[in-house]
Amino acid sequence: MIIKRRLLLSVVALGIATSLPSFASAEGLIAIITPSHDNPFFKAEAVGAEAKAKELGYDTVLMVHDDDANKQSELFDSAIASGAVAIILDNAGADATVAAVKRAKEAGIPSFLIDREITESGVAVSQIVSNNYQGAQLGAEEFVKLMGETGKYAELLGRESDTNAGIRSSGYHDIIDQYDMEMVAQQTANWSQTEGYTVMETMLQANPEIKGVISGNDTMAMGAWAALKAAGREDVIVVGFDGSNDVRDSIKAGGIKATVLQPAYRQAQLAVEQADQYLKTGSTGLDEKQLMDCVLINGDNAAKLETFALSE
Amino acid sequence: MKRTLLIATCALVVLPVLTGCKIVKNPTAEEAALSEANMTDAERMAALVAREYTPRVVPHMETGAKDIGAVLDAIGQDLDTAGESLGIPKASEGSPWNFIAKGEGKVVASNRDSRAAKLEVDVTEDGAADLSIQLGPVIKGTALRDSANFYVFTEFRDQIEFAKLARALNDTAGAAISLPDGDLVGETVSFTGAFSLAKASDPVLLVPVVLSTGGDQ
């Protein structure tokens, strides 16, 4: 029943921007806009935000922009037209998103950003992001250790328009480049598992001597691991980033060696809490841009990981 | 006559383009802005730290430093309570606690050959190391930046720029360290610095802004 209703809302919000039914909820409607739920990371965000919003008495509408800034812009128009009281957003591009968030602000709708930053401050009310630099350094330290501080490796980069791709790579290299390690290939796989697979295949053909692969996220790491496995190269050390259940299972099975958990579920909930606080008091009482630390996941603690949260 | 002409020429030429004339009092701000726009994030943050490290960062650390014994003692009881009373207020949920501390202790072990060189220091006089002082050149973490909390993330373009700030601060702190050669085991060191702690059980990795041998500081 709940699923049906959510679907209905999504369809209505996507299709008919101007004529949404009115909502029964006392607190109003929160629009939750993320990249595609095909990546469990974004699904966890959406689910986390939705659960918290419902708990606080809001109606929710879940929408996905598929990393398409034009589509995101249309979704913002839908959210504005449907009278949303707040928008929770994991955005489709650091530069391209500024205009959409501004438009919502001018319409009196505050936006609360998670996971990815935009390049301007003073437009969104909150930007809560994982401390990607800190997390990448944790991942890189583990990678260096696993590699025995030496050897050739390849790097899979995320989508170029996303600040997180650059910051993670920067965090990786601030550690790795201090050691006697040589990067023989570096290429984007656009956060995608299928691209991770094909890019890894190509890299492996050109550089069969690689000893390790460090990846900007877990889905690309999963793709790379599948390609390595298919090539009989399960000796290659792979480290990812996100802390997905898929990579957790791979770590437990002795496949991928490590990842870095971003507290995606809690982050989304926190954004909703701050939206609620802002709507009720006019302020979150916090700085706009906030960092949440990441946690290294390896064989020691993988069992405690579930849906982007670590149990104590 | 010549002088009048010169001044007139200067005025005409210089109105739109403030170059090459002594009348212009202070073109440095504009020039600085222009040259900063052409810098990489790392270069821009290094320039910022070069300007502010000595007049701003070091005094902030010296003024804000708590006694290391009291800080470690409080952390041993309860990290959150210690953070609230002796730490830097958290910028957000999910940040670790940051502490600025000073004190002295005896070096019980060291590793000065590593790229991430460290001194293991006993401050409680029980013969066991209570903290590591990072000597670099690889200095881990963002404790220095996050303790210098006049640097606010919102005021920086993005995480990349903010990360380069942390790196520039660490590099500057590391470069400022001047210690006698040798393993220094058995020596007393005086220090002022910062460290981050997410869990009470995590190791204390202090980034020093003041560090010297001898206990008379």
Image: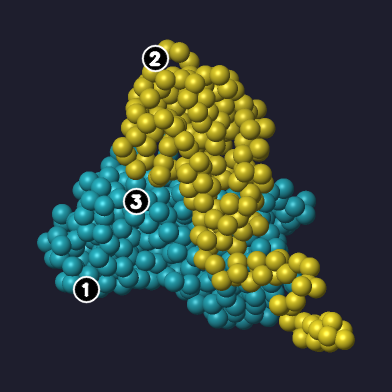
Q: Residue at x 34, y 27 (%)?
A: B183
Amino acid, disc 2:
Gly
Q: Which residue is located at x 55 percent, y 23 percent?
A: B103
| Dot 1: element | helix
x and y, in percent, of residue A259 in the image: 34, 51
**Label number found at residue B127:** 2
Using the numbered discs, state the Cα–Cα distance from disc 1 to disc 2 in whole angstroms: 55 Å
Q: Are marks 3 and 1 in contact (CB under 8 Å)?
A: no
B36 over B162 or under it: above or below = below
Q: Residue at x 28, y 42 (%)?
A: A299
> Outermost residue toward the top?
B126
Whole-angstrom CA distance, mark 3 to mark 2, is 32 Å
- Residue A293: tell me if it is visible: no
- The hue in which chain A appears in the rendered picture of the protein: cyan
Label 3 and label 1 in one chain: yes
Residue A223, percent across and down?
27, 65
Chain of residue at mark 3: A
Quadrant of the image occupied by residue B193: top right
Tell me, for residue A178, which label it has, or none.
3
Q: Which mark is residue A112?
A: none
Find residue B118 and report its image quarter. Answer: top left
Q: Nearer the viewer, residue B180 or B155?
A: B180
Q: Give the amino acid type for the residue marked by disc 3 in the picture.
A: Gln
Q: Disc 1 vs disc 2: which is toward the camera?
A: 2
> Mark 2, chain letter?
B
On the image, the x and y values in percent for residue A189 come to 34, 71
Q: Which chain is yellow?
A: B
User: Is A18 on the left-hand or right-hand side of A253?
Assistant: right
Residue at image mark 1: A202
**How many numbered marks have been drawn onto this rendered protein structure?**
3
* Residue A150, x across and y down, in percent: 23, 51
